[in-house]
Image (spheres, rainbow, N blue to C red):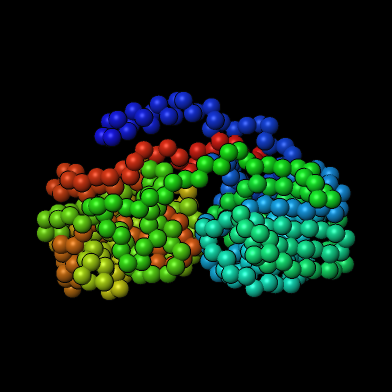
Amino acid sequence: MNRVTRNLVLILFVFVCLPSFLPAADLKAPWVVGNLDRWYVENGVLRCLTTTTGDPRHVWVEQDFGSNYTVKCDVRILGWVDEDASRAGVSVRINPNDLQRGLNLLLHNDTNSVDFLNDGTAWGPAGDYAWTINTWYTMELTANGNKLTGTVYPKGSAPSSGITQEWEDERNGARAPGFPGLAAPNNAARLVEYDNFQVLVNGSVAFADDFGPNVEPERTPFAAPWVTGTNGAWYLENGYAVCNADVSGDPRHVWVDQEFGDGDYTVQCDVRMLNWFDADHARSGIAVRINPDDTERGLNLLFHNDRGSVDMLNDNVAWGTSGEFAWQVGAWYTMTLKAEGDILTGSIVEKGGSNPYSITWDDASDRNLARSPGFPGLTGSTAPGLVAQYDNFKVLVDNEIVFEDDFGANVDPVWTISREIP
């Protein structure tokens, strides 16, 4: 399918499917959103993208189920970093009149922990259970008087394949009756998915929401002339290139294995971070002069370290010019990086905007020139837990496009809301 045909298909898709993207008022109640985060439904799953820090973080069903009931839900973590504020799971007895506190069963702190928490009061027993990001787990939490029983196991497996733990404490009973719901991370820029939510009373389903038909996005590998580097974590999904860093690795690149002269060319691409945490190895962007024979090192323009920085980097050699540029998780930015001899010129602007922010690095030590010619490509996070999307990749020589890839028609924009809560 050529580019014109793909664009016509995309336009037809938008007009045919537009009604399903509009908010559906009938979904708002009985759900209630607590602290302000972005909770939205897409592809038949409920997503939470936390936008700020805060404790606790809940959405709940404001309906009376008594004091003793079970919450069951499938949970998948899409971005993670090991720290206390990293937590997500299911909740019972959430009390809007007590600072929205409740009782929780959480994937917490690291990828080996499942913990109980009475919000703002006490941690309960912690269980050792190895789980992985990007994998669905079924979580069940039962409240019965002072006693909590929690189970976590891989979706589709028997509960006995996971972990079950109990916590009996008078403070748990004091939270009755409250409301059933879900818990999101307490740190900013984390992405979690939830599906097949149920409330059970005496073993019978009293409330259920599957958030619509689950359309699991199809992931495919990069194809020639693209080459995926040693550290991997790259795939194509819904017309985007994606890097979902599940392990550490430095550098992390994909590149176009094609000659573009002596290394003087420009790379341009739209980049969007779906989550973030402030750390040195939190970095994503575009690259020139990637050299597979030199441990895949290249020259980079990156979102780096925090949400106020855009930096240049010669992989494993030296940091270059750093620029102060405030950017937002979930927003698209067009990044451009031009290599011309020793000089790198980078710019960034919100997609569709004007007056790009520019930085230049003239490395008199010739370290930038030494990377010639190399290959143009993309850079992913070198720390696990970050998810980045890329679109509309171009290579230009003398201001003429010599290679481009839009990665297919964008049939599933992440910020297209089909139903919002609330």
On screen, 383 above or below 207?
Answer: below
Residue 316 visible in the current orientation: yes
Task: Tell me the quarter of the picture where residue 183 sits.
Answer: bottom right
Of residue 264 and residue 259, the one placed in the foreground of this image is 259
Q: Residue at x 84, y 64 (%)?
A: 147
334 horizontally vs 267: left or right:
right
Residue 203: horizontal and vertical position, in percent?
81, 50
142 horizontally vs 21: left or right:
right
**Number of marks present in the image shown:** 0
Q: Residue at x 43, y 29 (%)?
A: 13
Q: Residue furthest left?
A: 262
Image quarter where the N terminus lies is top left
On screen, 293 above or below 152?
Answer: below
Task: Tell me the quarter of the picture where residue 212 sits.
Answer: top right
371 horizontally vs 227: left or right:
left
Residue 64: horizontal and vertical position, in percent?
84, 44
On screen, 246 above or below 17?
Answer: below
Residue 330: horizontal and vertical position, in percent?
48, 48
Residue 252: horizontal and vertical position, in percent?
34, 64
Q: Residue at x 20, y 46 (%)?
A: 403
Q: Residue at x 74, y 39 (%)?
A: 30
Of residue 74 and residue 85, the one placed in the foreground of this image is 74
Task: Tell me the quarter of the picture where residue 309 sits.
Answer: bottom left
Image quarter where the C terminus lies is top right
Residue 178 visible in the current orientation: no
